[in-house]
Amino acid sequence: MLRSHTCGELRPEHINQEVTLCGWVQRVRDKGGMLWIDLRDRYGITQLLFEDNPASKELLEKARNLGREFVVAATGTVIERFSKNDKIATGDIEVRVSELTILNPAKLPPFLIEDETDGGEDLRMKYRYLDLRRGAVRKNLELRHQVARHTRSYLDDLNFIEVETPVLIKSTPEGARDFVVPSRMNPGEFYALPQSPQTFKQLLMVSGFDRYYQIVKCFRDEDLRADRQPEFTQIDCEMSFVTQEDVLNTFEGLIRNLFLKVKNIDIPEVPRMTYADAMRRYGSDKPDIRFGMEFVELKGEDTDLTSGKNFGVFDSAEVVVGINASGCASYTRKQLDELTEWVKRPQIGAKGLIYVRYNEDGTLKSSVDKFYDEASLKQWAEAFDAKPGDLMLIISGEADKARKQLNELRLEMGTRLGLRSADEYRVLWVLDFPLLEYGEDEATPGSGRWYAMHHPFTSPKPEDIPLLGSNLGKVRANAYDMVINGVEVGGGSVRIFQKELQQKMFEILGFTPVEAQEQFGFLMNAFEFGAPPHAGIAFGFDRLCSLFGGADSIRDFIAFPKNNSGRDVMIDSPSTIADLQLKELSIRVAKS
Amino acid sequence: MLRSHTCGELRPEHINQEVTLCGWVQRVRDKGGMLWIDLRDRYGITQLLFEDNPASKELLEKARNLGREFVVAATGTVIERFSKNDKIATGDIEVRVSELTILNPAKLPPFLIEDETDGGEDLRMKYRYLDLRRGAVRKNLELRHQVARHTRSYLDDLNFIEVETPVLIKSTPEGARDFVVPSRMNPGEFYALPQSPQTFKQLLMVSGFDRYYQIVKCFRDEDLRADRQPEFTQIDCEMSFVTQEDVLNTFEGLIRNLFLKVKNIDIPEVPRMTYADAMRRYGSDKPDIRFGMEFVELKGEDTDLTSGKNFGVFDSAEVVVGINASGCASYTRKQLDELTEWVKRPQIGAKGLIYVRYNEDGTLKSSVDKFYDEASLKQWAEAFDAKPGDLMLIISGEADKARKQLNELRLEMGTRLGLRSADEYRVLWVLDFPLLEYGEDEATPGSGRWYAMHHPFTSPKPEDIPLLGSNLGKVRANAYDMVINGVEVGGGSVRIFQKELQQKMFEILGFTPVEAQEQFGFLMNAFEFGAPPHAGIAFGFDRLCSLFGGADSIRDFIAFPKNNSGRDVMIDSPSTIADLQLKELSIRVAKS
């Protein structure tokens, strides 16, 4: 080793020892007769001391010429520090240097290597290797390592076996776009990179592996919205001879274990909510339950407190639904106008926002006073369980749309009222998702068909199977999502394990029998040779890490992320390749 | 859970308990009044008992109709077994079944699901999910999981941090062929799949991560020789502020730890041998040191015991070199002729084989008696340290070729003499590899240039740097391989960490400055911002697992391997893709 200790290791008990440290020059403070250097490595910072005395003129001069981020080795004696620094673990000591070696000089970095840096996103991504030197970024990757470690340890202890599934697989038309890889040895043919190891993990169940997991890279060639990456990592799991209940318990255990081991937080038993309930109460299949503000219906399937007052907007609406922003009665007209504009933005798309103020003096004031008298508003306030000081915010219209819009408003109000702290964690299971959803390719009107809400291998609830012939939209799946703080971190399902049901499913999804056999024949054939009942789940590992780190962006938890155009600006990839390569691969570039 | 216990769990202490087991029907033995079923899962086999009595007619009938590999759940009472089976862990008990559920029937598998199967390679690969059911194959993957687990645990304890590097990177011309991935969002541009995370792990050192590892998939588009896979797994590691000695010690520790934890074998300190020594003593840079039979030179740089006897073959040879096959003097003429034919096969390419028999009566008999008298042969025998009963086998010719041929013969003799047991493990470090080797593209005569023997990032030995200007072939690298039983399982090097030296290296390898900057500019730029001295190693994980499993083929240790044409015959990949996909990717198929 070029060092005897790391920069995070020395303590008072090392005083008088001769040590050698290696690291980067974080800071030089030159007081003329004395000079201090903060020497940094992954483990910490240690202060080096250089004194001006006749014997060490040359040494001091050498130290004086060091720049930021020079890599040096320094040998010297550990001494007690005159003014201690209780902010760092090595703050009680410093090293009086007797020998200094410059291992590598450094040009001035293009931005400050500090937690608070002056470098913009683009610059930091181009010099990602310097960005990764910053303590804040390094800690994110250390956290990621810990999450992976404890995930493996928990699953290993439960007899799960990690199996590596292939990366070069077969392209399938269902789901998102595949990345493909031309095969040189099989001209005109292509591998695809996996969007998930779904079929392989099911085959492992058919093979009797009983409990499988893998922390695995997956790939999706999607137009990248903010915070999507073309390659991402999953904790992928599957179990045999289990019910949905067993999967929920096993992976609730995983998450609680991770919170305990990584964050030292004891998460209580995870509550469960059906998809139908989540949509009704929060207008979202991933409700943030750190705060209440649940939806209240003034008009809907079971209630109507708004009709017959000649207010056309409500009269023509399928639903009238609102939330109670407790304590917000004092919102000014300006604030309410701004909120109204906020919900009317194209991203939200509401036509308007109705408010009812429950004044501190007990009176009610609304934006629809023209149509609704005090008695009506009183009724509404009761429905909202409102009290003086509260503000009711109401949206109306077509049921699904109105709920989605109100969901956005609810989250916004939660944020504005400080009810969504990144340090508070609320975990939730959402259950009983619909098996199918009807969709249409936007480019092709009339192209509507049924799509699998989770994926084509998800099992309908046995009691709903009869509906497969009659009412596809009503069929519920044994599918489940784990939601933390309003973010879906994982999802899974009980799988189909009988060939006939799987065939039926492909048929519903618009596959011809030939297509189904061509794409997924290997799986349906496997089901004929003794497939066990099985179920599984996958967690978005990058997202999970960012939640544990209390951050919004997954990019900060990936060592070398790509930008929104799918580029790695550091290595400048993707790039053109040689004509010879193209020729060997039997392909040609054909830009349209 | 659909089961109360696994099929490997029940013991005499469970007698009289009611249990439910799930698994696959391995075997049905029907004795008329009684019927036994071996029920199998990943954890073991448990015997189920069905008795013929009035109350259970229907149950017995149901059991009678079960076929091999049916998936069933059976409930019943644990009882003591009449005739115990000490070959299985559950052999003391059986379960008297009271309830039987067929969870999924099974067609008759195309081959026997037993350790010794009747299925050929092709059939087993097509139905890999059934092949994986066989205990022998399952144990290989369980072993793989254990090797990964203990690797992580060892490295975690030494403060290594696992960092995921990207899979979609940039194509580089150095090394083997890249698999490439067309970028839809960047028409005409391509990602490449990594042959190793080499540059990224070096950048992580520049970032100060200090100790990195990753168990990671890598990709090489090579013509597949037997036992190569287009995707394979590496244990990839890198350390900062270390010397070669530190790397050797750290990873010798890893291997010894793995042998202890996974195989319960205490490997002694690992011996070291220079590349030059290995070539001289064994004619190979990965000698199998489970047995001796070291090379003896009769003619070479330092010795000549053959010239001046008018034997033209030896007189014109650069070297005359042989091995002593101890105890083989009794080989018949026929056996010796067969050995001679063996070395003359094109794969070996020797022109012939000379033998000297040291008979039990002390006389010497050779195939060159015409040229060499008893006194000469006696001299040779002394050089070989031969004794009565030994057989000396001698090859001559151009030095490198003769040594390579003799290496093959030595290994073959070791095998024939039973000196290469798969249960015996001899680990070896080979050091001081040449930095460069001269090569020529076979298709282009005169295209000769210097190639990096390890890779372009390997550091020359500091004392050999002056030779870079004058004698490239003599420059040794700080590069090392770990060899187990004659198989290279890992290799690495101390890296270049200064921009100038790295530039010089690219220049020697025939890169123009522009090409070097274009391909590896990000790395050389990184070296300017404070790169620490660093070194690393990578192990072939598939190969390591096959060695631990005592097997020759890596394919048996990969869940879903590809065949020699790079095909996955189970999922039938690679395959053609839709025209729309090609169009979106801005490429066209252009078969030549």
Image (cartoon, coloured by chain):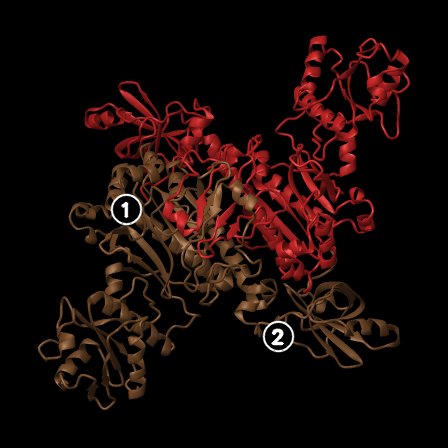
Chain colours: A red, B brown
- Name the amino acid, label 2: Lys
Q: Which residue is mark 2?
A: B87
User: Element under label 1?
Assistant: loop
The answer to whether residue B537 is left or right of residue A495 is left
Dividing the picture into quadrants, the one containing residue B400 is: bottom left
Q: Position of residue A112 (x, y in %)?
A: 40, 24
Q: Can you see residue A477? A: yes
The answer to whether residue B310 is left or right of residue A82 is left
Q: Position of residue A580 (x, y in %)?
A: 37, 48
Q: Which residue is mark 1?
A: B459
Q: If you read the primary sequence from the N terminus, does the residue marked by circle 2 or circle 1 appear first?
A: 2
The answer to whether residue B268 is left or right of residue A432 is left
Residue ID at (57%, 64%)? B126
Quick one: A183 or A251, which is closer to the camera?
Answer: A183
User: Element under label 2?
Assistant: loop
Q: Position of residue B319 (x, y in %)?
A: 18, 70
Dividing the picture into quadrants, the one containing residue A552 is: top right
- Name the amino acid, label 1: Ser
